[in-house]
Amino acid sequence: MTQNIYDDPGFFENYSQLPRSREGLDGAPEWPALRALLPDLHGRTVLDLGCGFGWFCRWARQNGAAHVRGIDVSERMLARARAATEDAAIVYDRADLEELALPRSAFDLVFSSLTLHYIVNLARLLAQVHDSLHRGGRLIFSVEHPVFTAPSKQGWRIDAEGRKTWPIDSYLDEGPRSTDWLAKGVIKQHRTIATYINTLLGVGFSLCHLEEWGPSEQQIASRPALADERQRPPFLLVAASTLPG
Amino acid sequence: MTQNIYDDPGFFENYSQLPRSREGLDGAPEWPALRALLPDLHGRTVLDLGCGFGWFCRWARQNGAAHVRGIDVSERMLARARAATEDAAIVYDRADLEELALPRSAFDLVFSSLTLHYIVNLARLLAQVHDSLHRGGRLIFSVEHPVFTAPSKQGWRIDAEGRKTWPIDSYLDEGPRSTDWLAKGVIKQHRTIATYINTLLGVGFSLCHLEEWGPSEQQIASRPALADERQRPPFLLVAASTLPG
């Protein structure tokens, strides 16, 4: 089973303080870009992998989805998601995404925000996702950008000329990276952009759009600390589809 | 017109000394990976954009291609290509790829090695390429990897812990980068991986394969200096196709 860091009390407490935890989707600066990739949800059946507090599940229902299923490995997050939801058309389930078995041809959209970089066996999960979608269905997900996850020691450096840079090493050496993010020793899986893309293509998806997300000028104007994120993108957003019916 | 650095005498002299110029395709460490993306060429009509000395054009003919057309902007390179070729089924033409007009449905394969990062109007050229291919045709190309081209000042740094790193900045700021590579002030266009991919998808291609090329263990064993290239990939290889017929 993947490290379930979200049920670590210290991590959970710190995670709960993040803008994206307190404010929901609008607290995540990449949300407008991710939302722009979504299809019309009216009458659709939606699955959210790594649903956390359920913000996206509730948003999907408010935007017309007929049925929404949220899956997460964290009991603490699911407890809060259930407490925040009064809607019989939203179902939350606890499951380890490494072992997940999904029904076939059951969903129109699978969504996943900042979750797949925790998964060791990505090909297995994406094959499950592919087969769980109707023909012409969509997978929209975000992960930490491979340039962000690659370094053996992640962080900014100021060089001799005063430039702020993000030094890369180990980009082609895929596998676990341990970082001290909200708690010590949080394990995420580094893989290259090519591996994300070729794994999708290999299980039968077509690629529709790739985005290396960085803040807009408007976002930087209202939150100047975001400016660094244009030096190297923090997130990779991907839209893929199954064959049309 | 794009800077025609290959007709600069000093650049041309230095370029001519590179292993890939003297030994041809086998002097390029990424060639085995690029070759693996190629379709069977028997009886096919092939276009090489940025054909240089014509190594690939001749290889394509030796591997069964029926007709091969090589295009380059450099008179010096084309002169050497023509001198090295005795084959009426290979035609070399001089053209600026920024202004290129190609015949429609004329080719089975368009190939391009380390050329497209010189092009300012990539969308225009890729639309021409798309329309020049038969249904089910292939585009296979390599470019300098965006992580390689991004920095405002490209180069390796040794950090305080002795790690060799490639510091990134300006990744999301696309546009010209001036480097001193074989001559002073060589201009290449930095664009993100997402821009390469979305431009392909936007003109009608499907993505077949993406490769962030780095040397294999075997290549490093025989050329230890290549080891650094695993810290950050130097080349991006792409295979795309038009809709099947």
Image (tube, coloured by chain):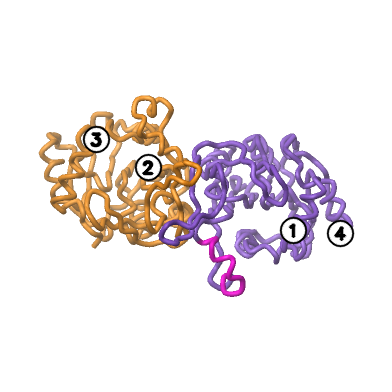
Chain colours: A orange, B purple
Q: How many labels does the image show?
A: 4
Q: Mark 1 lies on which chain?
A: B
Q: Which of A165 and A230 is in front in this view?
A: A165
Residue on which disc 1 sits? B56
Separation of disc 4 and disc 3 at Cα?
A: 64 Å
Estimate how packed mark 2 is, as few (under 14), some (14 to 19) or many (20 or more) residues with alpha carbons within 10 Å: many
Q: In which quarter of the image is the N terminus of chain B?
A: top right
**Chain that bears disc 3:** A
* x then y, percent, for residue B70: 78, 50
Q: What element carries label 3?
A: helix
Q: Of tags 4 and 3, which is closer to the observer?
A: 3
Amino acid at the residue labelled 1: Phe
The 10 Å Cα crowd at callout 4, few under 14, some 14 to 19, many 20 or more, is some
Which residue is the site of mark 2? A140
- Which residue: 27% across, 33% down? A27
Disc 1 and disc 3 on one polypeptide chain: no
Specify the segment rendered in magenta: B220-230
Choose mark 2 or mark 4, whichever is in front: 4
- Do the numbered discs 4 and 3 sit on residues whose CB atoms are within 8 Å? no
Could you tell me residue B85's position as x and y percent? 86, 59
Residue topped by disc 4:
B85
The CA distance from mark 1 to mark 4 is 11 Å
Is B229 in the magenta? yes
| A34 sits left or right of A4 in the view | right
Decide: few, some or many residues near mark 3? Use Cα within 10 Å; few <14, some 14-19, many ≥20.
Answer: some
